[in-house]
Image (tube, helix red, strand yellow):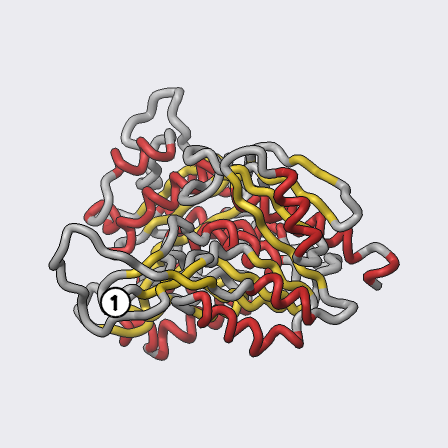
């Protein structure tokens, strides 16, 4: 875990998006980071010091001058915080604070810490404000200056704003911010064998319509597939993520295609499969779909109802049957028990290069959780049992295994 033991200084400004910061702190802490918060006076109107102190397990820093002068107090924290931090994040960054740090002003603790942060430490700025403010000449000029002077400015998203308008200026969700932080601390591998490889990842569930308001599906959250896509993009791959209906932000640097049904996913895979180098089928594709879809809503007229189901296409097997010599096919096999043999048979039957046997226990591994216990089996029968890992770390280990396959002479 790249954030384990890292010191993160989080600057919070006075914008409505400050309410998302406790969740960001929780995510950072979960990754093993130490988090200290420095906030502006205006930020206290949107999120309380008590909340931030509770989730960070550290006192919140707000004033340059200490309230008391006892010997235990850090009288020079405007300097010591900059020395302590491995990275500084300003989120949300308001137009006012952006102007201050661009001009080099130090009239509050946050802007002073920005100046005292050691020059080799990353600085991430997440602007969040009304769309017209964000597009203003002054804000764009200041952001351009920050970029040219070594700061990474993460562009805001488009969506509903606090003003009631809809446009650019919305701060990304905490999960997206976390991914930017991890990438900025150097997880991306420029020497990876995945550099410039074209990778397709499928993720999430599919929905198979029964009528206009009902469908068959499963509990897949898409977290595993999204973690794989994110980790592959960090290694320099050209990643296309084909996903069923999920509530996850698109990983940075990933091309996303949203689908609903298994047939939709098959169509998108077939459209682009010939140009890919690696296909990773992490989606939980429904095995069956209703033979007929009723227009409108089926009425409740009897105690029972019979559904006739037909097999969905096997997208992974279809790709493997058509794959070229240089292409790799990677699949998943989720089982509740005794599934290792079944996974090995699936590897053989579908002509896969690697399969991840995914143990499902409903609590720590499988759907709707943040961890997975994978066992990797390659086409030569080599089995690697991984411990229980976060899905992000499991994705990294899976990609390591894929890189090992690419290093073999028969894969060029």
Res. 351 image quadrant: bottom right
Q: Position of residue 397 (x, y in %)?
A: 65, 45
Q: Closest to the observer: 127 or 180? A: 180
Going 43% across and 44% down the picture, which residue do you hit?
Answer: 367
Up the image or down, 73 lies above or below 352; here it is above
Instruction: State whether residue 113 is above or below residue 272.
Output: above
Q: Return the residue found at the far right.
A: 409
Left or right of 223: which side holds 38? left
Q: Which residue is mark 1?
A: 211
Which quadrant would residue 339 be assigned to in this image? top right
Residue sitting at x 30%, y 70%: 293
The image shows residue 133 at horizontal and vertical percentages of 28, 72
Residue 113 in the image: x percent, y percent? 44, 47
- The structure residue drawn at horizontal position 69% and vertical position 56%, both measured from the top left corner, is 352
Query: Is 340 displayed left or right of 312 in the figure?
Result: right
Which x, y percent locates residue 149?
55, 65
- Quadrant holding the N terminus: top right
Q: Which element is circle 1 on?
A: loop
Out of 191 and 375, give the one closest to the viewer.
375
Q: Along the horizontal axis of the image, is 406 left or right of 321?
A: right
Quarter location, residue 324: bottom right
Q: Is residue 144 visible?
A: yes
Give the left or right position of residue 41, taking residue 275 as reference: left
Image height of 330 relative to 38, above or below: below
Is the residue marked by circle 1 packed among few (<14), some (14-19), or many (20+) residues within 10 Å?
some
- The residue sitting at 38% across, 31% down in the picture is 58
């Amino acid at each position: 875990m790249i954030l384990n033991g890292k010191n993160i200084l989080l600057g919070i400004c006075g914008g409505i998006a400050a309410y998302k910061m406790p969740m960001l702190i929780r995510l950072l802490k979960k990754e093993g980071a130490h988090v200290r918060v420095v906030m502006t006076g205006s930020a206290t109107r949107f999120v309380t010091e008590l909340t931030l102190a509770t989730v960070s397990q550290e006192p919140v820093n707000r004033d340059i001058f200490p309230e008391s002068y006892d010997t235990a107090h850090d009288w020079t924290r405007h300097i010591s915080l900059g020395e302590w931090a491995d990275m500084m994040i300003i989120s949300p960054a308001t137009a006012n604070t952006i102007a201050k740090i661009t001009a080099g002003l130090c009239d509050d603790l946050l802007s002073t810490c920005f100046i005292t942060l050691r020059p080799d430490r990353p600085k991430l700025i997440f602007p969040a404000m009304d769309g017209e403010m964000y597009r203003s000449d002054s804000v764009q000029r200041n952001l351009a200056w920050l970029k040219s002077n070594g700061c990474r400015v993460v562009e805001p998203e488009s969506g509903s704003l606090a003003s009631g308008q809809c446009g650019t200026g919305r701060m990304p969700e905490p999960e997206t911010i976390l991914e930017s932080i991890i990438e900025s601390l150097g997880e991306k591998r420029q020497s990876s064998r995945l550099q410039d490889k074209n990778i397709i990842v499928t993720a999430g569930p599919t929905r198979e319509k029964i009528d206009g308001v009902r469908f068959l599906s499963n509990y897949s959250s898409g977290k595993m597939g999204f973690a794989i896509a994110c980790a592959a993009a960090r290694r320099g791959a050209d990643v296309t993520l084909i996903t069923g209906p999920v509530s996850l932000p698109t990983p940075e640097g990933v091309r996303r295609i949203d689908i609903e049904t298994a047939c939709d996913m098959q169509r998108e895979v077939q459209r682009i499969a010939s140009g890919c180098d690696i296909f990773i089928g992490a989606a939980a594709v429904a095995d069956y779909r209703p033979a007929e879809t009723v227009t409108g809503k089926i009425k409740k007229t009897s105690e029972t109802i019979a559904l006739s189901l037909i097999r969905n296409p096997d997208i992974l097997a279809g790709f493997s049957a058509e794959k070229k010599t240089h292409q790799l096919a990677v699949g998943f096999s989720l089982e509740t028990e005794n599934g290792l043999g079944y996974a090995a048979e699936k590897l053989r039957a579908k002509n896969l290069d690697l399969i991840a046997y995914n143990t499902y226990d409903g609590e720590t591994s499988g759907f709707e959780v943040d961890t997975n216990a994978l066992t990797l089996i390659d086409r030569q029968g080599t089995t690697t049992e991984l411990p229980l890992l976060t899905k992000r770390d499991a994705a990294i280990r899976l990609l390591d295994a894929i890189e090992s396959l690419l290093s073999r002479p028969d894969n060029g």
